[in-house]
Amino acid sequence: MTPLSQPDLTNEHIRKRRQRTRAYTFLLVVCLVAMALEGAACFVLLESIPPTPRQWIFAAALHLASSALPLFYAYKPDSFPGAGWYLPKLTGLIALFLPVIGIVGMPLTIAITRRFVHSQGLAHDFDRDTLKLSAEDEVAIRRSMDDLLREELATQPIVDILLGGDEDLKRGAIMLLKRMKSPRAIRLLKESLSDVSTEVRFFAHTALSQLEEDAMERLEKAEELAASGDSRAIRDYAVTCRDYAHSGLPEASMKTYYLEEARKLFRQYLDKEKQDYATHIEIGKICIELKDHTAALNTFSFALDYPETHLEGRLGRCWVYYDMRDWQQLRREMYTMRVNKPDTRDSDEFNRALYVFWAQQDQPSKGPAGARA
């Protein structure tokens, strides 16, 4: 689909709004005419008491005509499934089996519902809960705030589009999410599989399938290269497995499998490249995700013996104790960080800021578990 320019998007919104207004206006007119026919049927029956057979036949014909109007109404059903299909059909069926009450009560119910009742379906739950940083996300400490802000600015307009009703914009948003390939973009694509529009669900499914296929091709290629035994190829394969686990594509069980595979490959790489101490940090982070806290502590403790990884080793130990909710050990670690501050000139600026953050904390939590020992 060719992206629309800003004026084109504005004109498209105006056109869609006018069509939607016209659809609901036509539906209202149909309901009013149906009510008039139903009223005429009641008037015929009440013209004489008791009604004659001819009156019953005439009233029944008017009632059937009243019910048929919404049943046969269809104004652009593909573009407006609510106004053009479901609502009039439901109104006609109820009016057919509930004379007078149906044709009056159904439009009134729809009007009240649209005015006072707001949807709380999957899209709203997703916007309220899933879009917030959670324990399943990458730990915020491993990402710079610039990256986080950049991702928020890039994806929030897409979220607004996906929560809207414009199918053309939704298709464009899905294509953009496919190109972004970030974990959050993948989550938004998965949520789009539950969209009310069949076309949007199809586009989301196609995008996810293509992303999965591309990821599998990268994994297979990396595995073939690693089979040669080259240490760099083994490390690249480990990184590919880890990135796939973090991509948002695999389910929980497969994510665990690829994290385990990445840890095994990183260790295999270290058997050949023992001087690459930074890889121990990568292994420690994976151990935290796998909830293997003992292995994570051992790995980060090993990193403390080398100046280039000392700071990240300390940060890693903090996150292990935090993940274990071992507040006493965490406070001891922070005290050690305050007293024995390492040379951080060669460290990443973000990690230096994190080190200062942890070192200056008196206690990790305001709750009872974080009280002073």
Image (cartoon, grey):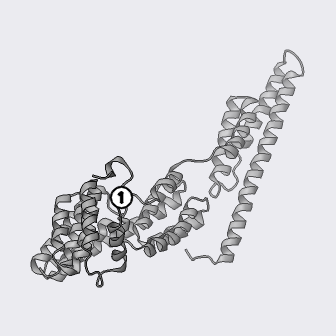
Q: Amino acid under label 1?
A: Glu
**Quarter of the rendering occupied by the N terminus:** bottom right
Q: Quadrant of residue 218?
A: bottom left
How many marks on residues?
1
Can you see residue 289? no
* Residue 207 in sight: yes
Q: Residue reaching furthest right?
A: 47
| Residue 136 at x, y percent in the picture | 35, 58
- Residue 8 place in picture, x, y as percent: 67, 75
Please tell me in which quadrant of the rendered image residue 106 appears.
top right
Local secondary structure at mark 1: loop
Instruction: Report the residue at 53% width, 68% height from top.
Output: 173
Residue 48 at x, y percent in the picture: 89, 18
Q: Residue at x 19, y 66 (%)?
A: 261
Left-right relation of 34 to 233: right
Is 51 situated above or below 31?
above
Residue 371: x %, y % from top left: 33, 51
Q: Nearer the viewer, residue 190 or 235?
A: 235
- Residue at 25 percent across and 55 percent down: it is 328
In this view, the residue farthest toward the bottom is 346
Pick whichever, 246 or 69, lies toward us.
246
Q: Nearer the viewer, residue 134 or 261?
A: 134
Depth order, front residue of 256/282: 282
Q: Most extreme residue toward the left, as rendered?
A: 271
10 Å crowding of disc 1: few (<14), some (14-19), many (20+): few
**Residue at image mark 1:** 136
Q: Is residue 264 left or right of residue 88?
A: left
Q: Is residue 97 above or below residue 318?
A: above
